[in-house]
Amino acid sequence: MLLLVWILNAVALLVVAYILPGITVASFGSALIAALVLGLLNAVVKPLLILLTLPLTIVTLGLFLLVLNALVFWFAGSILKGFQVDGFWWAVIGAIVYSLVSTALAGLLAS
């Protein structure tokens, strides 16, 4: 099941790269690696960032979480060779679209 979710997240990343011109994925293999790195960053780094920025998140009524998602997405694009994000605003839009597409694909898997 975990392998299938990983593949679906890689497909979601390819869909995001197809839709948005500011995000580039070189191949399906690059998408698999990027999906793995994004999953690891979301599991390890993001909770720490949420904890450190909790006051700002509360003041903005949770909207700062969008910025954190974009920063994690942008960071993954900057450390991987086959996955590129062209700027912060592309990271914001890409993180939102990636979240929506991966949720939709996971919903198809659950039904």
Image (cartoon, helix red, strand yellow):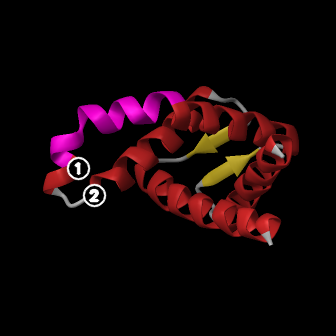
Q: Which corner quadrant of the image does residue 46 belong to?
A: top left
Q: Quadrant of residue 84?
A: top right
Q: Main secondary structure of the magenta part?
A: helix
Q: Which residue is mark 2?
A: 62
Identified by mark 1, the residue type is Thr
- Residue located 54% across and 34% down the image: 43
Q: Badge 2: how crowded within 10 Å, few (<14), some, or many (20+)? A: few
**Above or below 44: residue 107:** below
For badge 2, the amino acid type reads Gly
Picture quarter with the C terminus: bottom right
- Marks 2/1: CA distance? 5 Å
- All told, the count of numbered labels is 2
Q: Secondary structure at mark 1?
A: helix
Residue occupying the point 27% across, 57% down: 62
Left or right: 63 with respect to 20? left
Placement of 56 over or under 108, stated as above or below: above
The image position of residue 71, as x and y in percent, is 42, 41
The image shows residue 101 at horizontal and vertical percentages of 67, 65
Which residues are drawn in magenta?
Answer: 44-56
Q: Are marks 2 and 1 in contact (CB under 8 Å)?
A: yes
* Residue 89 on image: x %, y %: 42, 56
Quick check: is 45 in the magenta stretch?
yes
- Which sits in the foreground, 83 or 6? 6
Numbered badge on residue 57: 1
